[in-house]
Image (cartoon, grey):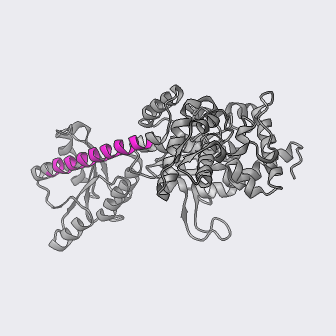
Amino acid sequence: MTDISNIAILLVDDEVINVQNVGLFLERQGFQVTTALSGNEAMDLLSQSHFDLVITDLKMGDVGGVQVMKAAKELHPEIEVIIVTGYATVNSAVDAMAQGAFYYLPKPIKLKELHTLVLRATEKTMLLREIRRLKQRIKAQQGTTQFIGQNPAILELKDSIAHFAQLECNILISGETGTGKELVARTMYELSPRADKRFLPINCGAMTEDLMANELFGHEKDAYTDAGGLRNGLLESANGGVVLLDEIGEMPLTMQVKLLRVLQEKKIIRVGGTKEIPIDVRLLAATNRDLKEEVQKGTFRQDLYYRLNVVNLHIPPLRDRKDDIPLLVNYFLAKYSLPNGRSKSISHEAIQRLQDYDYPGNARELENIIERSLALCDSTEIQTQHLPSDLSHSRHYHPQGLQPVNPSKSLEENECEYILSVLKSVDGNRTKAAKIIGIDRVSLWRKIKKYEKNGIEVE
């Protein structure tokens, strides 16, 4: 049976006496009641708080009951709405029910009848939420199995993902390129209470500062030349859901200030606007950089770092969990074999060679190797000759003269050398280089600009 004390009801009517009488009655029955004296006020409350049921008058001065109902169901699909009116007709009742109302109640309200309706409506809401929760659990279990691995560090990471997904605290997901940061974020979303809303990954390294502000916050009509009409930003469009800010370390300092404000106040201001707009999104951030080191360099704000790094989920590189390579290989074999109607295995010698390699591109590089090997293999079993030839010469894959990792140099120095050698191997073709490295062309352009600023010549 539903615990009435946990049921939150939004009561909307522009007649004060009705709000007071009905609100007092429902509170005496044990419900939590919030009141609004206009449709606009109800809309604001719906965007800021959680409710289990809406009881709204049909005709109000500004925004009517049907509009309130549509806004409520858009924000919270399971919510039920009871529409009350003093202008009851068969046609208006049928119309309201067709648009999603739970019931259409004429005035004057019979409180006993209202009480029965409230109990029925909230029971239905709770049942729908329980069904969603069970579906979400099944989906989440499917999602976590995609994060392949039985290494102790991975098992601990899976436990952390399951635990922190249920909370609303900020999460910083760290790990090298190709380790699966977006997969961790998506799994957290699937396990979270927000799984029925939108999951929106945003690559902070793929946008200029002006474009990022416009994309994240939207703009008002005529905010700038060619702005056109009003446009909601990505954060607004993901209201109620989960947003992943990938490559957060690439975000310019001025944008970091704006993001900090969003985290603190849960509000945005569109480009060219002055009105604060409340948003309800859970922000996850991901980076392949050491943000603590970036803070010391002055390229990342310390206050933002502490805001984001409430919990740090670090994904170990593949070279530190080589016992997971056979599991990953079998997963990728199934992923790329079955769509083509071919089921292939891999020899023990080939697995051994794959385990002898250090994978600077991590799981993403292993996936590319398996996909390539399947394309080259015309038998039922992948052999060592189907693997990249460089694997037999070095623990680091560096085609056409790419340099292996030098442990005496910093991560940034190794990254610079690696990128320069990739560019050299493809005759300066930045599109090809970005694809090999595993980043987009804009991110590569940013890195090259940074190297040139530090006096490093890039062809």
Between 353 and 54, the residue placed more toward the observer is 353
Q: Give the range drawn in magenta.
A: 117-143
Residue at the spot x=33%, y=61% of the render?
70
Residue at the spot x=10%, y=53% of the render?
113
Between 143 and 382, the residue placed more toward the observer is 382
Residue at the spot x=59%, y=59% of the render?
273
Measured from the top left, where is residue 130 in percent x and y? Answer: 27, 44
Residue 227, relative to residue 248: is it above or below? below
Residue situated furthest bottom in the rendering: 91
Residue situated furthest top in the rendering: 152
Between 344 and 170, the residue placed more toward the observer is 344
- Magenta-drawn stretch contains 138: yes
Q: Can residue 356 be seen in this view?
A: yes
Q: Can residue 265 be seen in this view?
A: no
Measured from the top left, where is residue 96 in percent x and y? Answer: 23, 66
Prevailing SS of the magenta stretch = helix
Measured from the top left, where is residue 382 in percent x and y? Answer: 58, 46
Q: In this view, does 112 lie to the left or right of 295?
A: left
Q: Is residue 208 left or right of residue 452?
A: left
- Magenta-drawn stretch contains 188: no
Measured from the top left, where is residue 318 in percent x and y? Answer: 61, 34
Between 19 and 304, the residue placed more toward the observer is 304
Residue 410, relative to residue 113: is it above or below? above
